[in-house]
Amino acid sequence: MNNAQPGILAPLPPHARYLTFALKTGSQPRAQLKWLSGAADGKACVVGIGALLAFALKREIDGLRPFPHYRGEGVEVPSTPAALWCWLRGDDRGETLLRAREMEKTLAPAFEVTSSIDAFKHGRGLDLTGYEDGTENPKGRKAVETAIVNDKRPGFGGASFVAVQQWVHDLDGFAAMPQKQQDDAIGRRKRDNKELASAPESAHVKRTAQESFTPEAFVWRRSMPWADATQVGLNFVAFGKSLDAFDAQLRRMAGAEDGTVDALFTFTRPVTGAYYWCPPVRGKRIDLRAIGL
Ligand code: HEM
């Protein structure tokens, strides 16, 4: 699919800013969306449309559904839907910030910013715990098949779905854990990224092993560390040709499948969770025909 938003499959940028927007009460967002479709090229800015926005435009996107909510012992997975999501990607933090400000200002007649997350690439693609993130992402053709919708209908083929969660880490708590407990929580050895066959069932990579689901549950992860003045974490981002694979993984992580909760919850927790549909591109514009624009 050569009409996917190019930022979805591209390598992680050094800097990023994730913006989410709510629709202002009674607003008519068509003019702002038309501007956005030209201003965002899908590469320096990846755009996602929430079900709330599609609904406001009296359109429904097949497969776009509400984000699930889980609550259990030591686990709270919130569902925080939003109308619009923009992943601004750049080489320069200042330039990325200024682009975000322009976007916020231009969209303001119809959209209200609900979060703005300053994110960055750490080392060769590490989480702030020091573990490499993205190792088992599908490669080459398989990445495209995993992430991008194959559909002949104009405006639909080349699209993608994305699950986004902001996770807040307790880095001090994590650092206080003995090395073996850290490795067992992830299921890989921090020192050399080797997968640990002996890790407990709660180990994150055992919970989410993509081949272990029926059907197999592959996702295209594009998460980035984030930080503000007082907190740090990972902005988890997973693209898929549908939301089914992510759904199955999250369900198992939360313990809803077999009662075993992912050990990630011992040192980090999600504070947001939302699904979006990422339209294809047409030329250098975001193709919004599926939502009637
Ligand atoms: C703070 C949150 C998270 C952190 C720090 C984290 C970190 C990691 C790390 C270090 C790995 C091992 C290397 C790799 O293959 O990438 C991994 C693997 C993986 N994670 Fe996460 N992850 C987080 C959240 C999630 C969530 C919410 C999901 C999906 C619901 C998920 C799905 C996966 C998958 C599918 C793999 C690869 C499993 C395999 O097939 O081996 N992760 N994660």
Image: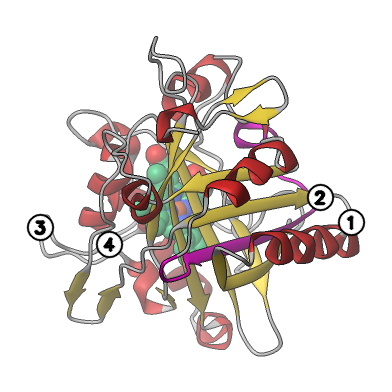
Indicate the secondary structure of the residue bearing disc 1.
Answer: loop
Residue 91 appears at what percent x and percent y? 87, 50
Q: Residues within 10 Å of mark 2 (few under 14, many from 20)?
A: many
> In terms of depth relative to the viewer, which is nearer, 266 or 99?
99
Q: Nearer the viewer, mark 2 or mark 4?
A: 2
Q: Earlier in the sequence, mark 2 or mark 4?
A: 2
- Amino acid type at circle 3 is Asp
**Contact (CB < 8 A) between labels 2 and 1?**
yes
Judging by the rendered image, the residue that carries numbered circle 3 is 258
Residue visible at 61% across and 84% down in the picture: 231
> In terms of depth relative to the viewer, which is nearer, 103 or 133?
103
Whether 291 is drawn above or below 153: the answer is below
Q: Earlier in the sequence, mark 3 or mark 4?
A: 4
Judging by the rendered image, the residue that carries numbered circle 2 is 90
- Amino acid type at circle 1 is Asp
Whether 104 is drawn above or below 194: the answer is below
Disc ID at residue 92: 1
Task: Give the magenta part as a residue range.
Answer: 7-26
Q: State yes or no: residue 83 in magenta.
A: no
Residue 262 appears at what percent x and percent y? 30, 64
Residue visible at 52% across and 54% down in the picture: 29
Q: Earlier in the sequence, mark 1 or mark 4?
A: 1
